[in-house]
Image (spheres, coloured by chain):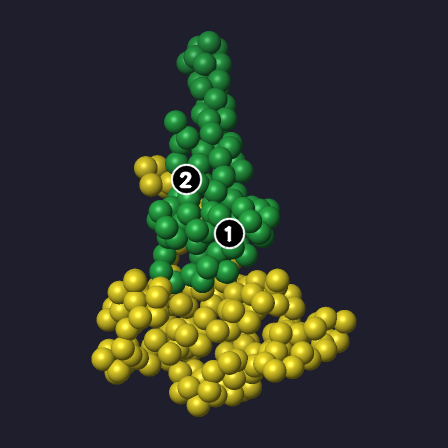
Amino acid sequence: MTLETIIKTETKEDTSLDLPWRVIVLNDPVNLMNYVVMVFRKVLGFDENKATRHMREVHENGRSVVWSGNRERAENYAYQLQHWRLQTLLERDD
Amino acid sequence: MRINYNIGACKPCWNGMIEFRLQIDSRITRAVVPLIIKSFSECGKTAEPVFPYPEESDQELMDTWAKSLREDLAQDRQRLARLLNDTKFAHGYVEIPDEDMELVLRALTEIRLFIRKANLEAFSDEELETGEFVLPQKPQLAQSYYLAYLVLAEVQEGLIAQAA
């Protein structure tokens, strides 16, 4: 592997890490609405209104994009939301 | 001093404990505690974390993710075990240390998800969300598990009220 290839590869990897990712929470029939609002506030730092808006979006549309940004933070949020047992996915924000 | 969520009266609490009484007839609570303990035991064996990347197959990341979540969830379950083993719980009293609240909330969610999947097939999602169904028309065992599911939700409601 030439130096140029290595630099290109590393640049590509760095760029892919910087691509925006979306944290998506899916609806489930089990979790209480006030539980979901509380989790959004604790994990994502939302205020009551924003947390309630996203909870309603999950409930009515089946999913809500609750955060978008770099992959590392997106993964961190997804992990915490899954730990709270919310169904959470990560998708590229194309 | 903190004011505790309680039924009919607020109770001052000095010792860093969350205490409240469930708004459910204690005969129901006593009847469903064995089902809750059974579900608790089973969900610990079968819980499998879901990897959040639908299209990625990085096995190392998947393994690390699952292992880490399993450990965190096991810790949550340990704290809930203390509550379930407390004889007062069967009589409708919830008493947990402040610092256990979040762990217990998460573990309660896990058991409710498990009960929904394993024992409440007789209920549609819509029925569970709206509560619009005739309970005696459901199979006997599903009725009992539904009551267990409700008791756990009631504990969660009480804890969330505390958190607020």
Q: Nearer the viewer, residue B6 or B132?
A: B132
| Type of amino acid at the residue the image marks with label 2 | Leu
Residue that appears at 46% across and 87% down: B25
Chain coloured green in this rendering? A
Chain coloured yellow in this rendering? B
How many badges with numbers are in the image? Answer: 2
Q: Nearer the viewer, residue A5 or B129?
A: B129
Q: CA distance from mark 2 to mark 1?
A: 21 Å
Question: On the image, numbered disc 2 is attached to which residue?
Answer: A90
Above or below A70: residue A29: below
Residue that appears at 34% across and 77% down: B145
Residue B55: % across, % down: 32, 37
| Type of amino acid at the residue the image marks with label 1 | Thr
Q: Is residue A75 left or right of residue B131?
A: right
Residue that appears at 39% across and 36% down: A91
Above or below B34: residue A20: above
Q: Which chain letter goes with mark 2?
A: A
Question: On the image, numbered disc 1 is attached to which residue?
Answer: A52
